[in-house]
Image (spheres, helix red, strand yellow):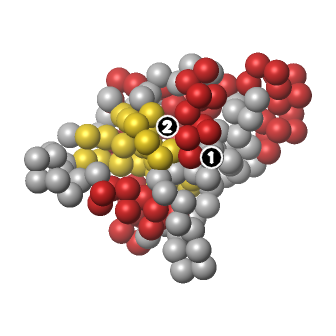
């Protein structure tokens, strides 16, 4: 079964705590990404999760995430089609549809969405994990993702 993580950048990989407390210290090394978030994301490596960037950063997020040590493979990004009547959830639904319409592709998949915006589709509710942009991704979010992916809790302290 394929496992996808739709990863937003602003508010998830960087966040208010990072910008106002920690970033000044590590700015030259980490840029716009909290390295602790990368460590948390790497906890999903044993589940064979593949990352799809669902952020306006698109391909600009690939190199910085890898440079900071993201071990999960980044396999693509969603199209930016946001408008008055379209939302991030539509972008994710479009990516899933376009990547599973070929009858030769195993169409069984699981996915998790990490985002600080709540503009998802109703059918994505069980796969969506809201991240507070003040604090970014936490251990609790990773534990919820592992539960959705069917993996055992890795760290119960979150």
Residue 90 appears left or right of 30:
left
Identify the residue at horizontal 82%, vertical 38% (top origin): 19
Identify the residue at horizontal 30%, vertical 57% (top origin): 98
Residue 9 appears left or right of 51:
right
Quadrant in the rendering for residue 52 = top left
Separation (CA) of disc 1 from disc 2: 22 Å
Question: Dot 1, crowdedness within 10 Å: few (<14), some or many (≥20)?
Answer: some
Residue linked to disc 1: 57
Q: Position of residue 25 (x, y in %)?
A: 87, 22
Residue 72 appears left or right of 56:
left
Which of the image's four quarters has the N terminus?
Answer: top left
Provide the secondary structure element on which disc 2 rests.
Answer: helix
Question: Dot 2, crowdedness within 10 Å: few (<14), some or many (≥20)?
Answer: many
| Residue 36 in sight here | no
Identify the residue at horizontal 11%, vertical 53% (top origin): 103
Residue linked to disc 2: 142
Residue 50 appears left or right of 55:
left
Q: Position of residue 61 (x, y in %)?
A: 60, 37
Provide the secondary structure element on which disc 1 rests.
Answer: loop
Q: Position of residue 123 (x, y in %)?
A: 36, 68
Towards the viewer: 125 or 19: 19
């Amino acid at each position: 079964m394929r496992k996808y993580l739709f990863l937003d950048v602003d508010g998830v990989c960087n966040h208010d705590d990072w910008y106002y407390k920690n970033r000044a210290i590590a700015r030259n090394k980490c840029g716009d990404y909290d390295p602790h978030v990368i460590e948390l994301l790497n906890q999903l490596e044993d589940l064979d999760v593949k990352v799809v960037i669902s952020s306006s950063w698109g391909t600009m997020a690939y190199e910085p995430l890898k440079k900071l040590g993201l071990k999960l493979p980044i396999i693509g990004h969603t199209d930016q089609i946001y408008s008055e009547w379209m939302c991030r959830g539509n972008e994710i639904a479009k990516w899933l549809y376009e990547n599973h319409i070929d009858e030769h592709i195993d169409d069984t998949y699981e996915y998790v969405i990490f985002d600080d915006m709540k503009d998802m589709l109703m059918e994505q509710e069980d796969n969506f994990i809201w991240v507070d942009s003040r604090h970014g991704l936490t251990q609790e979010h990773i534990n919820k993702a592992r539960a959705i992916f069917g993996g055992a809790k890795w760290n119960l302290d979150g």
